[in-house]
Image (tube, rainbow, N blue to C red):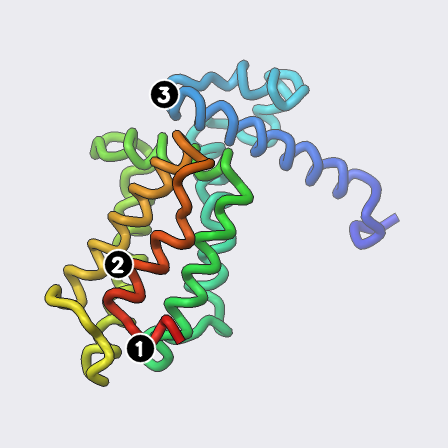
Amino acid sequence: MNASSGRGPYAKTAEVRRRILEACVDAFGETGFYGATMKDIAKRAGISHTGLLHHFARKEDLLIAVLELRDERSARFLESADAIDPAKHPVEALRGMLTVIVDSELQPGIMELHCVLSGEATSPGHPAHTYFAERYRSVRRFYTDAYTALAERGELSSAADPKTLAAMTLALINGLQAQWLFDRDSVKMESAIHAFLVSAVPGLAR
């Protein structure tokens, strides 16, 4: 039996890793990286401590895998060869990114994980510090490219320059995500982000 059959050791290994990562999302989201323990994660995943170490020898390895899981959908949009180039098609790129952000509401556990770890990782010694620093730079660059292209076309309606506006956009998104986790009934991420974007890019309203 081969891996493509969807059964056997390959499928079993993939299933165990999926359970481990889901357990990590819960554990890191609740207590942060430093508060979570390998034994607790193994218990949540329904495997032995030794079994966990077989898949992930260090907690740092788990952290990297979980961060990659959290970024999977947005990374596909930002890095895929088929992604919309913000410098060439800025309005379409902004619409696409809004879709990715709204989609994160379907994964509240991962959003909570992001909020906890990104705050914890502000310390230079945190194992995810470099990851978040690079991620924020990448996202700011995405928005800066889009806003710069719109400014050059005379389609940007903002007193802020593209680079500053990009930082403001990211700050709004992160702040709304945190507020949404506290009050999911009252905070509407999609409408709030869309209203902000339309105030700077009127063409998004069409």
Residue 74 coordinates in the image, percent (x, y): 45, 56
The Cα–Cα distance between marks 1 and 3, rounded to whole angstroms, is 40 Å
Residue type (three-letter) at the residue carrying disc 1: Ala
Q: Residues within 10 Å of mark 3 (few under 14, many from 20)?
A: few
Q: Is residue 32 left or right of residue 26?
A: left
Quarter of the image that includes the C terminus: bottom left
- Tell me the residue that label 3 is attached to: 34
Q: Earlier in the sequence, mark 2 or mark 3?
A: 3
Q: Earlier in the sequence, mark 1 or mark 3?
A: 3
- Tell me the residue that label 1 is attached to: 87
Tag 2 and tag 1, C-beta contact below 8 Å: no
Residue type (three-letter) at the residue carrying disc 3: Tyr
User: Residue drawn at (46%, 71%), measured in percent from left and top?
Assistant: 83
Q: Earlier in the sequence, mark 2 or mark 1?
A: 1
On screen, 171 above or below 179? below
User: Residue drawn at (45%, 49%), measured in percent from left and top?
Assistant: 71
Give the foreground label among 1 and 3: 1
- Where disc 3 sits, the SS reads helix
Q: Is residue 62 left or right of residue 205?
A: right
The Cα–Cα distance between marks 2 and 3, rounded to whole angstroms, is 28 Å
- Tell me the residue that label 2 is attached to: 140
Tag 1 and tag 3, C-beta contact below 8 Å: no
Residue 198 coordinates in the image, percent (x, y): 31, 66
Residue 26 coordinates in the image, percent (x, y): 52, 26
Residue reaching furthest to the front:
186
Residue reaching furthest to the bottom:
153
User: Residue drawn at (32%, 36%), measured in percent from left and top?
Assistant: 118
- Where disc 1 sits, the SS reads loop
User: Residue drawn at (31%, 57%), measured in percent from left and top?
Assistant: 139
The Cα–Cα distance between marks 2 and 1, rounded to whole angstroms, is 13 Å
Residues 191 and 19: in front is: 191
**Quadrant in the rendering for residue 115:** top left
